[in-house]
Image: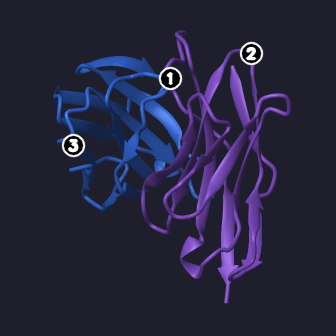
Amino acid sequence: AQSVTQLDSQVPVFEEAPVELRCNYSSSVSVYLFWYVQYPNQGLQLLLKYLSGSTLVESINGFEAEFNKSQTSFHLRKPSVHISDTAEYFCAVSRTAGGTSYGKLTFGQGTILTVHP
Amino acid sequence: DTEVTQTPKHLVMGMTNKKSLKCEQHMGHRAMYWYKQKAKKPPELMFVYSYEKLSINESVPSRFSPECPNSSLLNLHLHALQPEDSALYLCASSYIVRGNSEQYFGPGTRLTVT
């Protein structure tokens, strides 16, 4: 089975400051890693994903995440946040190979990022 | 078109009512999902359809009945719900059921059971 731990339930930060949202996972098998964002009263949107290759992945809106296999982490970072980044962020994993839970996303508990002016 | 649509946006129903939630996508995806999300919690998977066949049922109570009439549509039929079933119900789709398939989520139906 897989599990995901997001170490901070809430992260307040001022506009233009850097931010890091932490995610650790546990799995007995190889996994793919995802970050989803949920704006208030909306569904989830994929922010970025790690499938293979370079361990640093970037999104189009300035977020990046680095897969660290030895530390089983996939922390999300942004060097300068905007008010519009205020949302809830979910880290998730999915098995790379078959099994009864193949294709199933396992989510962390979420981190609410609040950007203050 | 990368949109998943869900109707209705809001639904209030009594415990004896029967209602349905609808989900539609036109991306040619062959995998569709129902999730339940309680406040301040992550989404919990309920059902997965692969090529219009139910492939995963996460031990969901029978008062929730999914249906996939065709590859673009997914319904969730509700009957005799309990107040604790009040939640945001999210539909998602992906190309196929596979670990690296990106899931596209709809905006959800906010359900209140009175």
Frontmost of labels 2 and 1 is 2
Q: Which residue is mark 2?
A: A28
Q: Which residue is mark 1?
A: B59
Q: Colour of chain B?
A: blue
Q: Is residue B105 left or right of residue B39?
A: left
| Label 2 close to label 3 by CB (< 8 Å) | no
Report the chain holding disc 3.
B
Q: Is residue B35 left or right of residue A113?
A: left
Residue at point 45%, 53% (across, down): A45
Point out the residue furthest to the bottom here: A117
Mark 3 is surrounded, within 10 Å at the Cα level, by few (under 14), some (14 to 19) or many (20 or more) other residues, namely: many
Q: Which mark is residue A20?
A: none
Q: Which residue is mark 3?
A: B25
Chain identifier of the purple chain? A
Query: Camera-side residue: B65 or A69?
Result: A69
Residue B36, percent from left and from top: 47, 44
